Amino acid sequence: MPESLGVHVLLDLHGVEERRLADAAWLRDALVAAARRGGACVVETTFHRFDPQGVSGVVVLAESHLAVHTWPELGFAAVDVFTCGAEVVADAVAAAVVDALGAREVTTTRCTRGPRRDPRREEAEAAMAARRMAG
Amino acid sequence: MPESLGVHVLLDLHGVEERRLADAAWLRDALVAAARRGGACVVETTFHRFDPQGVSGVVVLAESHLAVHTWPELGFAAVDVFTCGAEVVADAVAAAVVDALGAREVTTTRCTRGPRRDPRREEAEAAMAARRMAG
């Protein structure tokens, strides 16, 4: 059982091909595919290309979200993926994004989100529920 | 001059009124107002109410994004705001969100994003440019 409500992974991707970072349609397809490959469920997408360059895109997930913001001129993309439920999903989606974008260098920050679960309290509650059912 | 491309602030809001966290329209209005109050420029919004409860909402900003995911039954909201440019904007938007949602307890994680700027290198480059102009 996970000890937090969800996991938020921030990825700084350096050294990504400029033409990929400038292509909103390609980024949308890549992120949707990465979300699915990581085991997440896509609800909606919204992608915008900015003038003169750069794309912002968000994939709303049943599990929370996956977002990308790009600076093609710097070869840089800031990605974040937040999923609730199984912690492995955020990590799997993050790995699939890194794989798709082909970054030369990746900096990862991983934060657990939500009220921490207290295993001792959960055990006590489970025991109490079991007693109620037996009683 | 900022030393990073942008700032990503993650807010865990505890003890928020359940009815607010269940109300997608109220949350959309609150987040759009908070983004504007913090000095950000709203591009688009997408909000979803999940069954049986919980809302996921994203406000796409010219500066990046502001997102919320709620667990009304826990009185909990996970918010994140990422803005590029002036670092004060992310902090100001975050403060406005906390104010609007009226959380009893807030946990904040603040991450700088993007290639770090090196002030010494920028100084050297500025000096070199000045020499070129003078020469």
Image: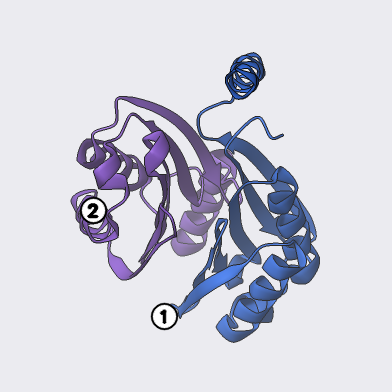
Chain colours: A blue, B purple
Residue A45 seen in render: yes
Q: Amino acid at mark 1?
A: Asp
Label 1 SS: loop
Residue B97 can be seen in this image: no
Which residue is at the front of the view, A23 or B1? A23
* Residue of label 1: A51
Q: Which residue is mark 2?
A: B39
Q: Nearer the viewer, residue A109 or B135?
A: A109
Left or right of A30? Residue A115 is left
Q: Amino acid at mark 2?
A: Gly
Q: Going by the image, does B64 lie left or right of B95?
A: right
Quadrant in which residue B103 is drawn: top left
What label does residue B67 carry, if any?
none
Image-based side of A6 in relation to B3, left or right: right
Q: Quadrant of the C terminus of chain A?
A: top right
Image position of B105 (left or right of A98): left
